[in-house]
Image (cartoon, rainbow, N blue to C red):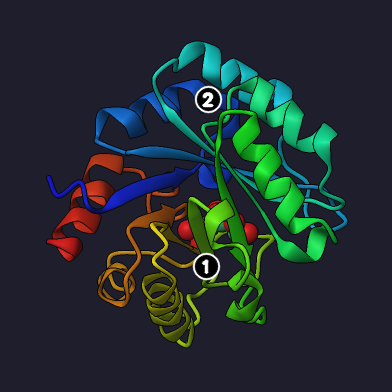
Amino acid sequence: MDKKHLIAGSILSADLLDLGNDIQKALDVGTDIIHFDVMDYHFVQNLTFGPDLLKQIRARFTDAILDVHLMVEPINEKVLGDYAKAGASMISFHPEATPHVDRYLSFIREQGCKAGLVLNPGTDTSVLRYLWERLDFVLVMSVNPGFGGQKLIPAMMEKIKEVKAMAAAAGANIQIEVDGGVAPNTIRACADAGAEMFVVGSALFGKDDIAKAMSDLRAALA
Ligand code: DX5
Ligand code: ZN
């Protein structure tokens, strides 16, 4: 298996009444990362999970990489600290959610987590310019955040390439994650553009046969 490409399963599309078993199945078929979408009905028009659920997931899956994508505002020490304490491995937020992006990226690392910034489809890459040394990863949204099951916006492939080129020019060692509409028919283009972590919700947890869903994704990447 090519571990240059990490699949992050978004539990947004999991069976929430059978979540533990769904996560176990996803890990069993080789899901590398569990992606945890936090929505607050303010930053996006949907409401999902909080730190108590994350804590239970961490208690049961002690070795899993737990990737917390915060679609909440405002971002502050309380929010970030809650998810870090609950067991997040990686935390990302949107620059529109706070005037203190630099400070809170540093804070995430101080909590022992990898720090990421998320770019909405309409958000320019220039926001990254003075932040490279604070960043472990950049999450490029390939749909507008809030809901699973949307269609990938093709123009975001250019943005991934741009982030990759900007990071290289800045000498920054970051990983690019892509989120939204990633499926067997779109994942190759994301990889070719420079993404290494692929958030997959409906095309993984949303499928009845998760083993086949994973092998279809891996086959498209191979
Ligand atoms: C959307 C979330 C995504 C979502 C992706 O706001 O950030 O993580 O679960 O779902 P799919 O893969 O179905 O587009
Ligand atoms: Zn997400």
Mark 2 residue CB less than 8 A from any atom of ligand 1:
no
Residue drawn 60% across and 70% down? 128
User: Is residue 184 among what the camera can see?
Assistant: yes
Q: Nearer the viewer, residue 17 or 190?
A: 190
Tell me which label, 2 or 1, sits earlier in the chain.
2
- Which quadrant is the N terminus positioned in? top left
**Residue 18 disc label:** 2
| Among the 4 quarters of the image, the one containing residue 209 | top left
Crowdedness near tag 1: few (<14), some (14–19) or many (≥20) residues, C-alpha within 10 Å: many
| Image: 102 above or below 193 | above
Q: Secondary structure at mark 1?
A: strand
Q: Nearer the viewer, residue 186 or 124?
A: 124
Q: Nearer the viewer, residue 222 or 167?
A: 167
- Which quadrant is the C terminus positioned in? bottom left
Amino acid, disc 2:
Asp
| Among the 4 quarters of the image, the one containing residue 65 | top left
Residue drawn 35% across and 65% down? 195
Residue 41 drawn at (x, y percent): 85, 53
Q: Is residue 114 left or right of residue 204?
A: right
Q: Which residue is mark 1?
A: 140
Q: Is residue 125 left or right of residue 189?
A: right
Q: Nearer the viewer, residue 116 or 190?
A: 116
Q: CA distance from mark 2 to mark 1?
A: 29 Å
User: Which quarter holds ligand 1?
Assistant: bottom right
Crowdedness near tag 2: few (<14), some (14–19) or many (≥20) residues, C-alpha within 10 Å: few
Disc 2 + disc 1, Cβ < 8 Å: no
For marks 2 and 1, give the one nearer the viewer.
1
| Image: 33 above or below 74 | above
Q: Is residue 129 left or right of residue 182?
A: right
User: Is residue 50 among what the camera can see?
Assistant: no
Q: Secondary structure at mark 2?
A: helix
Amino acid, disc 1:
Val
